[in-house]
Amino acid sequence: MNKSNWIAIVNRVAGGGKTERDWPLIDQILKKQGIPFEPHFTNRRLHASVIARNKIKEGYSKIIVVGGDGTMNEVINGVFAQKRINTTEVMLGMISVGTGNDWARMFNIPVDYEGAVQTIKQQKTFIQDAGLVNYRKNEKEWKRYFINIAGMGFGARVVERSNRMKDKGKSGPFLYFYNIFYSLIRYRAQKAEIEIDGKTYDRTVFSLNVGIGKYNGGGMIQVPHAIADDGLYSITLIKKIGKLTVLANMKRLYNGSIVTHSKVETYMARSIQIDGSRRLQIETDGETLGHGPMSFKVIPRSIRVISGELSA
């Protein structure tokens, strides 16, 4: 095997099985563009992490992620798990076939396969921050790296339900939107003590987003002030808010103006700790994890990704 080749990590179930259906076309486009690669297919949760870690250990350093934001999240965790080379020596490209594709949106990676492959071929790279969160699940402490957004509270509840539907083969652009309305009926805001760079706040949390990137939930802009390489988290806290008020402000969630609402607070920070109800759930990059208490820290400029044309 030529270790200067790309490794393509393919999540066949991403996008409700769309990756498996479209893989023959993607394979053809990669070959047509003259990109030498070896495909590796995932067959279980976190398998992409294992593949990435093992292949980097073997000497590979160029990875194409074929799937959604969750697949990229798994690969990132594999990059951090290996110790052979610095994480920034690994080059990551993406062909988006997921449901949300929010990370790819941030870096202007084309949604069409031809455009995505051409972007990979050009190899214009950007070194971004990564996040690291410690959380609880099944009475144990776990950790997870992420490269876009960690969502807590209502957003995590919506992601959990959406992921259960994806596991049953459901997909489509309205999946997340549908689950917002469904989850809103029963969700209750949670009390939490939040420490942001050493300063403590007692809040009743409807939703809390800790972001490196701007987009989540299939195009929502809940942390519009996020900068991917500034060494800081951008934080948007939505306090306890009425259900009708949420519905009335849906447009503001998608255009970024939600941060000016009277029930919303924003912060910038390097570290965050959250102590509160075990019912305050967390997701990162669209992957359901667990619950609090939680602690976050930033890993500055630690991941090299291939981007599209970024605006100034």
Image: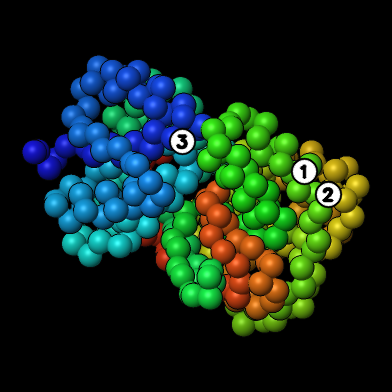
Is residue 304 shown above or below 35?
below
The residue under label 2 is: 185
Determine contact: label 2, label 1, CB under 8 Å.
yes
Determine the secondary structure under disc 1. Answer: helix
Q: Position of residue 189 (x, y in %)?
A: 80, 63
The disc, 1 or 3, on the residue closer to the chain's N-terminal end is: 3
Specify few, some or many for label 2: CA neighbours under 10 Å numbering under 14, 14-19, or 20 or more: few
Q: Is residue 311 visible?
A: no
- Could you say which is closer to the camera, residue 87 or residue 275? 275
Q: Which amino acid is tagged 2? A: Ile
Residue at left 89%, top 55%? 242
The residue under label 1 is: 182
Residue at the far left: name it. 1
Left or right, 277 with reference to 312: right
Residue at left 41%, top 22%? 21
Q: Which amino acid is tagged 1? A: Tyr
The disc, 3 or 2, on the residue closer to the chain's N-terminal end is: 3
- Could you say which is closer to the camera, residue 306 or residue 178? 178
